[in-house]
Image (cartoon, grey):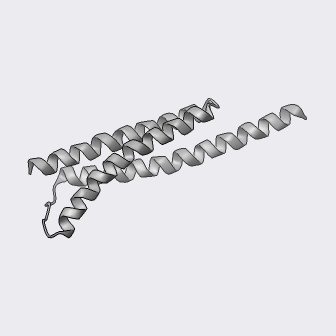
C-alpha cells in the first residue's frame, strides 16, 4: 500500500502545482502579460503530464491484472487530476478572451 500512497501523493503534488500555474496564467492574462500567461500554461502542462504519467502507471498495473486497490487517497488524486485539467481549459479560454479584449481596446484607441 505504501507504493500506491506514494504514487497518489505524487499525482496530487504535480497536478496541484499545475493547477496553480493555470490560475497564475489567468492572472497574468488579466494583467495583459500574455507571454507570461502562456509560459505559465506550459509550465502547468509539464507538471500535469508528470501527474498524468503516474496515474497511467496505476492504470497499466490494473490492466496487467495487478489490482492497485481503491482508497480515498486515490480518489482524491484522481479528483485533483481532473480538476487541474479543467483549470487548464478555463485558463486557455480566459487568455484568449483577454487577448481579444486587449486587441479590441487597442483598435478603439486608434480610432
Tell me the quarter of the picture where residue 43 sits: top left
Q: Residue drawn 37% across and 42% down? A: 47
Q: The C terminus appears in which quarter of the rendering?
A: top right
Q: Residue at x 14, y 70 (%)?
A: 65
18 horizontally vs 91: left or right:
left
* Residue most extreme to the left: 1
Q: Residue 91's x, y, as percent?
A: 53, 44
> In this view of the protein, which residue sits in the foreground, 33 or 82?
33
Q: Position of residue 82 (x, y in %)?
A: 37, 53
Residue 7 pos. (x, y %): 20, 48
The number of numbered discs placed on residues in the rendered structure image is: 0
Question: Does residue 90 appear to the left or right of 11 in the view shown?
Answer: right
Relative to residue 79, is residue 43 depicted above or below?
above
Which residue is at 29% across, 40% downward? 13
Residue 72 locus on image (x, y percent): 18, 52
Q: Is residue 38 left or right of residue 65?
A: right
Q: Residue at x 27, y 55 (%)?
A: 55
- Tell me if residue 27 comes above or below residue 68 in the rendering: above
Q: Is residue 93 above or below residue 24?
A: below
In this picture, residue 108 sits left or right of residue 25: right
Amino acid at each position: 500500500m505504501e507504493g500506491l500512497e506514494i504514487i497518489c501523493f505524487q499525482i496530487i503534488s504535480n497536478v496541484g502545482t499545475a493547477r496553480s500555474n493555470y490560475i497564475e496564467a489567468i492572472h497574468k492574462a488579466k494583467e495583459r502579460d500574455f507571454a507570461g500567461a502562456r509560459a505559465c500554461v506550459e509550465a502547468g502542462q509539464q507538471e500535469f503530464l508528470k501527474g498524468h504519467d503516474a496515474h497511467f502507471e496505476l492504470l497499466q498495473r490494473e490492466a496487467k491484472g495487478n489490482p492497485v486497490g481503491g482508497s480515498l487517497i486515490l480518489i482524491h488524486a484522481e479528483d485533483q487530476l481532473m480538476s487541474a485539467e479543467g483549470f487548464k481549459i478555463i485558463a486557455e479560454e480566459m487568455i484568449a478572451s483577454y487577448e481579444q479584449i486587449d486587441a479590441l481596446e487597442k483598435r478603439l484607441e486608434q480610432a
